[in-house]
Image: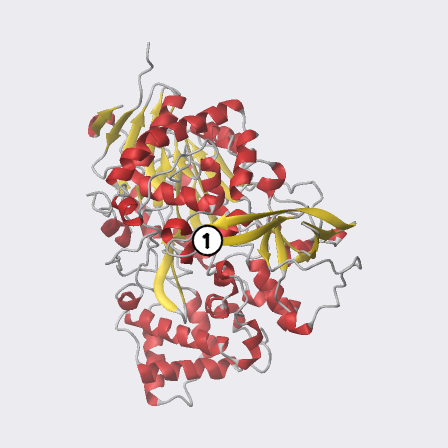
Amino acid sequence: MPRPRHRVHRDRHGIPHLWAPDALALAHGQGVVTARDRGWQIEVERRRALGSSAAFLGAEHLAWDVLARRARLADTARRCYAALRPDTAAWISAFTRGINSALPEAGRRAPEFGRAGLRPGVWEPWTPLAVWLSHHLLFAGFPSKLWRDRVGSVLGAGAVAHFATDGPGSAGSNGWLLTADRTTTGAALLAGDPHRFVEAPGVYQQIRLACPEFDVVGLAVPGVPGIAHFGHTGHVAWAITNAMADYQDLYRERLRRAGTAVEAWGPDGWEPAEVRTETFQVAGGDPVEVEMVETARGPVVLQEAVPGAPGTAEPSAGSEDPGSRGRWAAVSLRVPARVLGSLGFDALPALMRARTVADVDRAFDRWVEPVNVVMAADTAGGVLHRVAGAVPVRGEANRQGVVDAWDTTAAWSGRWEPMPRAAPRDGRAVMANARGIATPLGTEFAAPHRARRIAALLDSRPRWSPADIPAVHTDTLLPGASVLLARLVEPLDGLTPAAAALRRELDAWDRHMDAGSRGAAVFAAWRGALARRLAGDPALAALAPRPDDPEVFLPWLSLLGRVGHALESLTVPGALPPAVDVAAHARAALEEVARDGAPRSWGETHRLAAWEALPSASPLRPALEGDHDCVMSSSSVPGLTDLGARASVARFVWDLARREDSGWIVPLGASGLPDHPHARDQLPLWLRGALIPVVTDWHLLTEEETA
């Protein structure tokens, strides 16, 4: 007798609720719904993971494609899939079969396929793992090691920490847990919002997945089965943030050509390296051939032409040309997933079946990367606060910058760091990428402002209800503003009358980065002018991007971006070389704003700039609330642009008393079809920080089809 297939219901926002008779049929159904709702999006992600996006998106995507293939994303995905438990592999395979069954029709419905002249491709069972790797290759910010390597070589090792920031190329999140005695319901509340680059369609997909074994609501990553990051089973809920752990290493390689082969200098001398040449198709251009090398450390992700054999002498650390400081001829990347042959995807079906925090804990014991801080709570009063993932035990130098491939002290030990755990204090726990539970595992963390502000807000009242949580989500206070102003533009003596008037205007400002705030606009204009002046100071010129810097890593190597996000630490007396007169730059920046003017409000120029694979002729540019270090976080690059590419890509509150009292929101909508009624219907609510209810009563849903 044929097995009944999945059924799809929708709520009034078009969010899919799936029911199936078993977990495999449900995975198949999730694949079908994902293809129908997000067909163009997941096809782009598949091709980005394969390093073939330039073939239909154009030459500007070639740098990413080269990195994706150099990093061996597809090959690593195949290895990790082959090592899965058979039941997990079958579950993922059912998901990809569902995608493949629906993609041809999705290709006819989504107009972008026609615009790009593209037909949907075929998903292999390992493709979701490749998509995951593509999403998270840069998540831990390994290019920051290139930046730290440059700062150390130019200004000295002591200067590196002053540029520390979670800025321009990384991703973060807020999250908090309130125990039962801190809520009005007598059960725990779990809430938060991940901060990533905002994309259209959105990077998270609201979904419900139900079968006789489990019934889970959560935020899925389109193209990946299950619910990895934020979910609620009705019995237990979980959420994650980026732990800011350091688990990816960069090795400075010395390569030479030996006939048709390539060799790398390792701890024991010259050793064979794997070499291949790959061809990249480029829309509107000629094919491009790129040589790829992988050494014993890992794939070479940054590579110049490999020279002919130079001899067998061991490279000397002191033999570099001083003019080459902070540049790299060949750098390899070592990551846990490729070393272990696992991403930890066996955790995903286990999470779906979880009923207690102990179940969630055991599931995350299997996790590899990315490394996350996890919080969970269950209906029995259990709570969990831990780090999950794999961080290698190796020398401290590995965490700081690029290390020499031939240095025996830089080799991985084969051991893995223990994952820290903590208990909530005062009835709450907060995670916001700052130093805390994950400190032993990381090097560079977010400023403490968001974490401290969330804790202060939670302590401002004895108990919280689910309906109260948006008051935390939407807080726009910028604590560091007062520090900068007091440190840099005091006293008023010597300022022109116009600049002194601006300074008094800033004194009266409430330090909230609200869309309608004139004070926030003046502050941002001054901050941007200061960042440009500092970045342009001759004493920092050697840190500026260089013509041969790799394009794909430029966000991490941008001097202006680094300065703009690290102003608070860079303006501490003594942080920068003595030749940099920080106070003079600060006062000159205020005079510049007084002369040139500032926007009438923060929201006049601070607007959302969502990434689209095929940019719209009329992109959305709504005004944003909040700033980089606000709880309601949105990130522009001070001094470069006021457009915000990074913000909350979802907000949620999970209620452990009544799941139907939970709430969630995404920046755009449930549908990836640009003209669909549910493509943008959540945007007005998201902009003002509202949540929509999580519907759990099947009778309140509309059945879409029987498949």
Lateral position of residue 60 relative to residue 404, left or right: left
Placement of 362 over or under 544, stated as above or below: above
Q: Quadrant of the C terminus?
A: top left
What is the secondary structure assignment of the residue under circle 1? Answer: loop
Q: Position of residue 255 (x, y in %)?
A: 69, 55
Q: Residues within 10 Å of mark 1 (few under 14, many from 20)?
A: few
Nearer to us in this view, 216 or 663 = 216
Left-right relation of 475 to 428: left
- Front residue of 580 and 235: 580
For residue 235, say whether it is visible: no
Q: Which residue is mark 1?
A: 287
Toward the top, the furthest residue is 1
Tell which of 595 and 285 is nearer to you: 285
* Amino acid type, callout 1: Pro
**Residue pictured at 55% horizontal, 77% vertical:** 541
Is residue 52 or residue 430 the one in the foreground? 52
Residue drawn at (31%, 65%) of the image = 606
Q: With respect to residue 391, does 448 lie above or below?
A: below
The quadrant in which the N terminus is found is top left
- Percent x, y for residue 504? 34, 80
Q: Quadrant of residue 501?
A: bottom left
**Residue 365: x, y in percent?**
56, 34
Q: How many numbered discs?
A: 1
